[in-house]
Amino acid sequence: MASRGWLEEIKSRAREGLFKPAPYGEDIDLTEYNEALGRGEFDPARAEEVGFKTGGNAYYLQVDQNYFKYATRLSGVEIMTVREFVENKPDEARDYYWRLIDPGKDKYTATAALLERGGYYIRVRKNTRVEEPILACLFLSTSGIQAPHNIVVVEEGGEAVVMTGCTIAPESAGVHIGISEFYVEDRAKLTFIMVHSWSRVSHVRPRTSAVVGEEGYYLNYYANLSRVKTLQTYPEVSLGTRARAGLYSVVLGLGDASIDYGGAVYLKGEASSAEIVSKALARDRARVVTRGRLHGVGRETRGHLECRGLMLSRESYMLAIPELSSETLDASLTHEASIGRLAEEEINYLVSKGFTRDESISLLVKGFVSVDEKLFPPRVKSVIDSVEKLIVGKAM
């Protein structure tokens, strides 16, 4: 068995970053919050809104920091808590635990590393193709900090869909810091869908990183469909030779929300390719910043970045920051960025066709938030459609 000294090194690095603010987004004082150690009070109705239903063949449920339930009846799929993974398989865990994300990167990663109790470990074995989505729910039932650490490994030739829904009991003043590390091996495919539904007093700080092996494919869809106090996230993906990645997000800012989100893909492998599409809606007095970066390293790399913003009130604010960079002459990288409001002529056109004004606005917003369904496996298209309908309903 390997020495456990590496675990203390992780804690040591975390302590160094405990008071370091993130480079982006609004800073918050975490010392005002205790660890969320509620009584495991789970609300199935709120969980279902973010795509989680109990009774599946492969699932993980966490409430606060101290209630965990999981099971898998799918061949080739392993599920347990990350703590169990580290304790029971330390030699294996050393290759995946805090390998893609520095625990001392900022106060949020540091807090997660020092408080860590939960989070899921999911492993899809070599050449295993999972037809049924693997479901996960991270539920915050009380005020405090919830800091799960999730690790997903899809071995060579494997294929899986992981759907995670994160939500909170109404009016709980909570902080959610979700650490997620994804390992997609050669010729493997992972579709990861994350849906958030928070309260107007929630602070949310996901930290995500993925590495994709040769000819692997990583598809990430993120949606925020409710009020949130502050949200800041910037997932990063590293691609190997002929690997592909797609990062798609739809974020709704309501009330006095302060949102700063984006993503970066590093095209390190030869002939790797990526697409980043961010769609943001801002209503009321919400402030939304969208960021995106494509960085070409390998030869013959290709990438496209799109940042689109829709302002739904005069008091809202939006900022789009697209970035392209390259270390090679062979990269082909493009971007589009736009911020605007619904065009009055388009509304009037639909009204002339018999729709009411409200129906016309709803149709236009639906068209804005829609993501190409051909990107997703057929078994999750209904989830994407329901998320889009919820966003439209709450944006109106």
Image (cartoon, rainbow, N blue to C red):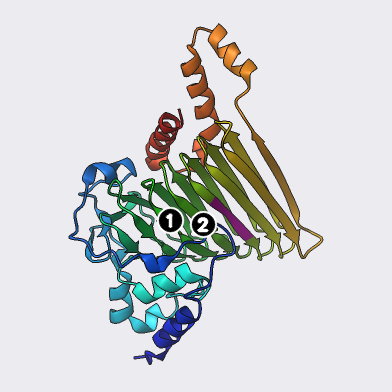
Task: Estimate how packed mark 2 is, as few (under 14), some (14 to 19) or many (20 or more) residues with alpha carbons within 10 Å.
Answer: many
Q: Quadrant of the N terminus?
A: bottom left
Which residue is nearer to you in this view: 390 or 132? 390
**Which amino acid type corresponds to the residue marked 1 in the rendered image?**
Val
Q: Main secondary structure of the magenta part?
A: strand
Is residue 263 within the magenta segment? yes
Q: Which residues are magenta?
A: 260-265
Residue 342 can be seen, yes or no: yes
At x 71%, y 46%, the residue is 335
- Gap between marks 2 and 1, in whole Å? 8 Å
Give residue 54's position: percent from left, percent from top. 22, 49
Whether tag 2 and tag 1 are in contact, CB under 8 A, the answer is yes
Residue 354 in the figure: left or right of residue 269: left
Give residue 148's position: percent from left, percent from top. 35, 65
Q: Which residue is mark 2?
A: 233
**Which amino acid type corresponds to the residue marked 2 in the rendered image?**
Thr
At x 38%, y 80%, the residue is 92
Q: Which mark lies nearer to you, 2 or 1?
A: 1
Give residue 33's position: percent from left, percent from top. 35, 65
Q: Which residue is mark 1?
A: 204
Q: Determine whether the residue tagged by mark 2 lies in a helix, strand or loop.
A: strand
Image height of 42 relative to 103, above or below: above
At x 69%, y 60%, the residue is 295
